[in-house]
Structure formats: C-alpha cells, structure tokens
Image: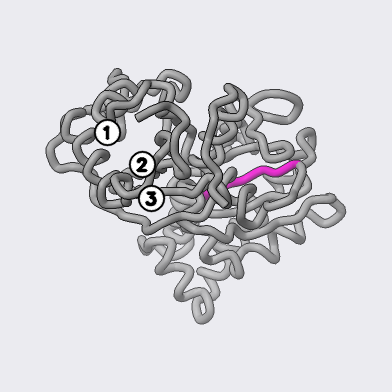
Amino acid sequence: MVAGAGSHVLVYDVGGSHLSAALCATSDLSLGAVVKVPLPEAQTAEAFVDVLANLAVKAGAQRQAAAGAGFAMPGPFDYAEGISWMKHKMPYLYGINLRDAFAQRMHWAGGQVRFINDAAAYLLGEVGVGAARGAGRVVGFTLGTGIGSGYAVNGRLVTEGKGVPPGGEIWNVPFEGGIVEDLISTRAIKHSYLERTGREKEVAEIAAGAEDDAIAKEVFDEFGHNLGRALRVLLHDFAPDVVVLGGGIAQSSKLFLPTARKELEGVKLELRIAMLGDRAPLVGAAVAWLAHAEQTHTAVSHPQ
C-alpha cells in the first residue's frame, strides 16, 4: 500500500485485557464498526501481531483503503519508535518494535504506523468530536484503576511547558503526602470504603448502593473533594478552559461531581463528562495520526 493513500485510518485501542479496532474516516472522524477481542492466549509477539492483522480484516480494512494505522497504547512505551517497555502488562512485547512488525505484516512503510498514549488518545477523541470539541485549553483524565491524563492546546497534545507534568502524566505527581493516584483511583475508593466498613467491594458495587448506603455516599463525596482539590492545585499554572473526565469512575459522576465542583468555586474551569466512552481512544488515535500526516505533508484522501 502506498503511504498516505486511503480515506480511512485503521485505529486500535490496546487495553489490559482486550483489543479494539475500527476504521476511522479521515473526512469527519466517524468510526465504522468497532470489533473487539481478548488479548491472545498465546503470549508471543507474533501471536499479538496475528490478532492485530485479523482485527484489521474484521474492521473492513480489505474493503476500504487505509492510509495507515494508529494505536492507542498504555505505557511505558516509546511512542515515537513503536517499542514497548511494559513489563507488568503484555510482557511478551517488551523490547519489540511493534511498528516494524505490524508494518511488515500489512506490507506498509514503517511511517504508516503510529502510536499515542491511550489517555492522550482518549483526550484527543473528546477534543475532536466529543465533550471538548472547540475548547482551547483542555485537560483530560481517565479515572479508573489509575488516573490517565492528557493536555491539549487548540486541538494539539502538549507534553511539556508551564503547568504540564513530565510527559503530560499526572498519576505520580506528588500531592498531599503521596501521589495523585493514591487519592484518585478505584484503589482509593475501595480502600476508603474498606476502612469505613471492613468490607471489600468493587467501585461499581459501591456506587450502585450509594442511594441507600450513607457510607458509600460519604466515600464518593470524599473522592469528589480530593478530585476538586487536586484540580485546583495541580492545574493552576496550565489554566485549562475545560477538564474532561472519562473512564469507569466517571460513569458514577453524579455521586462526586457536585463536591468536586464545590471545591473549584472561584476557578474559571468547566468540568465535563466524556461523551464517547470507549470509542474515544479510537477516534483520538486517528486524530493523532492525521495531525502527524499534516506535519509531514502526507497526502490523505478526503472523499466528498
């Protein structure tokens, strides 16, 4: 396939337990059918690339011309070179140049395959066609097992500069005697509930019982206060117009958003809940791919 030829970008979201893929139109960032499979049982890099290639077929890559592929990947990962440095997740990819391996399998040039941090991709998806569309300065947080983050100015990711933590990653930034993730994560909610009740529950279960369980409500109030304080302190220098909250915990936003907003009274900042859900990283991977194509003057088809 000729680099830059095609009206779609093949996009992937690589999660801890599954892989998702779709074709994203370069004209309007609309997604085709999203296909999802578990991570391969055979723990080898070759098996992983096989699954990626099979997903491309299922997503329709043989029927629609694809200009290349964009991956939303967790870290640690060398996004420029396409090399995984993860040991705790998908260790069979450690040190593997996934860009070259996948490009070779697809008969593409290496430059047609590009990678972006999954939390940053989530943000770019929301900036492109979601909750942050049209906003100038945006920060996105995915609230889940940990806290993913991304910073953007006028639709472009930023990973350095005033108010931006190294690499745009806020999870390990010092905060109130620990790090941000100690207070803003599923682990924090579960620990808070366990301390108060002596019972272990998953976050979804705690949230489901909050209407009748005063302690569950108290736990989410505390989470909201912690989130609001963190946003007030840690985003002061970056001064975003909008903060988009996504991830599993955001599905229970009605339980913590009021207290978070109360902590932010007087701060010129709007909290919004993500609109695209698990489609956001896929769209964001395409946004990043197209931005890179624009920077490198790669021709991409935009059919009328």
Please report contact status of discs 1 and 2: CB closer than 8 Å, yes or no.
yes
Q: Is residue 148 visible?
A: no
Q: Nearer the viewer, mark 1 or mark 2?
A: 2
Circle 2: residue type: Val
The residue at the far bottom in this view is 212
Mark closest to the chain's N terminus, 3 or 2: 2
Marks 3 and 1 sit apart, C-alpha to C-alpha, by 21 Å
Residue picked out by circle 2: 14
The answer to whether residue 141 is magenta is yes
- The mark that comes first in sequence, 1 or 2, is 2
At 22% from the left and 28% from the top, the residue drawn is 92
**Mark 1 highlights which residue?**
90
Q: Give the side of residue 121 with respect to residue 256, left or right.
A: left
Q: Residue at x 23, y 33 (%)?
A: 49
Number of residues whose C-alpha sits closer than 10 Å to that of mark 2, classed few (under 14), some (14–19) or many (20 or more): many
Q: Label 3: few (<14), some or many (≥20) within 10 Å?
A: many
Residue 180 forms part of the magenta stretch: no
Foreground residue among 30 and 239: 30
Residue 135 horizontal/vertical position (percent): 75, 48
Q: Is residue 162 above or below residue 149?
A: above
Q: Are marks 3 and 2 in contact (CB under 8 Å)?
A: no
**Mark 3 and mark 2: span between their CA atoms?**
12 Å
Q: Residue 274 lies in what quarter of the image?
A: bottom right
Where 271 falls versus 109 (above or below)? below
Residue labelled with disc 3: 22
200 or 171, which is in the foreground?
A: 171
What segment carries the magenta color?
137-142
Outermost residue toward the front?
A: 304
Structural distance between the alpha carbons of marks 1 and 2:
10 Å
Describe the element under mark 1 as helix, strand or loop.
loop
Q: Position of residue 60 (x, y in %)?
A: 31, 51
